[in-house]
Amino acid sequence: MKKHELPVSKDGNLVVGLCDGETSMEVKGVKAGESLTRAQAQHVSGALMEEWLRKNPNAHWDAVPLVAQAPAPGSTTPRTQQPRTPAPSKGTVREGGVTPESGGAEVKKQQAVPIQDGHTYGAFSDRDEAIWAASTEQFVDEGHRVFHDAQAIGGTVGISCDMCHPDASNTHPETYPKYQVQLGRVALLRDMINWCIENPVRGRPLADGDPRMRAMEAYIYAKRKGVKLEYGKK
C-alpha cells in the first residue's frame, strides 16, 4: 500500500501528514517519536484541515453532520411501531443458544433459550427485537469510543479520527467502493480507515476482522443513516 511520504524536519520535530497524502505540518517543540497532547493534536488537525480547505475551495465538505444521521451513542429513540403478534411457526424448537435477562450487554452471559428452527424471519417477539436493537447499539457505541480514542486505535502521535471528522462527518461511507487517488486503486471504506490509521494517526493497519475495525465501520455507517448509496462518487 502507498504511504504519505512526509518531509523531514531539519530540527528533528514531529511532522504530521493529512489523509490527502499531500498536506503536512511540522509541530514545533515536539520531537519525532513523541506524542501530542489531545489539545495539541486537535490544534494540528484543525490547522491541516484549514490548509486543505484553502487549497480545495470547491471541495464538497459538510460543515456539520446531516440531520438524517443516527442519534448519538447512548441516546434512545421512542418506538413508534405497534406491538405485533409473532407469526406461528411450523419449525421445531431446540434447547440451546443464549437468553439475555436484560439488554444486549448480557446476551453472551445467559444460557438456555429455545432457538427457532425453520423460519429465519418469523416467530420473533418484541423482546427479541429489543435485544437485537440493544446489541446493535452497543456495537455502534464501541465504534464511537474507538473513533474518538487515539490509543484505542493504535495511534502513536495523539491524533484520533474525530479530530478531522467530528462525529464521523465527511467520511461518506455511502460513496464506497470508489477509486482513491491516495491508494492508487479502488477502495472500500475499511481501506480508507486503514490509510488514515497508517498515515495521520501513525498506527498499524487493522485486520478486516479486527473488532475495532468492525465497530468503527458500524459507527460510521450508523451516522449516515438515511443517506442514499452512491458508490463511486467523488
Image: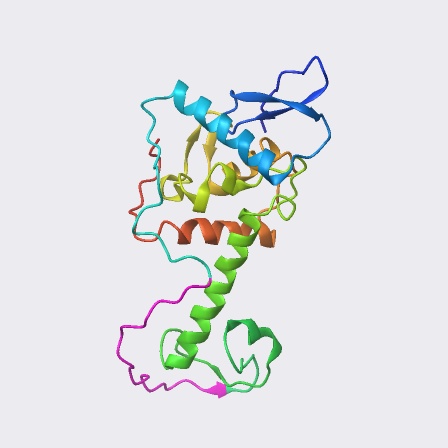
Magenta residues, start to end: 74-93
| Residue 75 sits inside the magenta stretch | yes
Picture residue at 67% right of the left edge, 16% below the top = 8
Q: How many marks?
A: 0
> Residue 144 at what x, y percent from top left?
51, 53
Q: Is residue 133 above or below residue 199?
A: below
Query: Is residue 3 something that shows in the picture?
Result: no
Picture residue at 63% right of the left edge, 49% below the top = 152
- Towards the viewer: 142 or 67: 67
- Towards the viewer: 181 or 169: 169
Query: Is residue 153 something that shows in the picture?
Result: yes
Q: Is residue 69 above or below residue 116?
A: above
| Residue 213 sits inside the magenta stretch | no
> Residue 121 at what x, y percent from top left?
37, 73
Q: Is residue 77 above or below residue 94?
A: above
> Residue 40 at what x, y percent from top left?
60, 34
Q: Quadrant of residue 157?
A: top right
Picture residue at 51% right of the left edge, 80% below the top = 102
- Towards the viewer: 17 or 122: 17
Q: Quadrant of residue 107?
A: bottom right
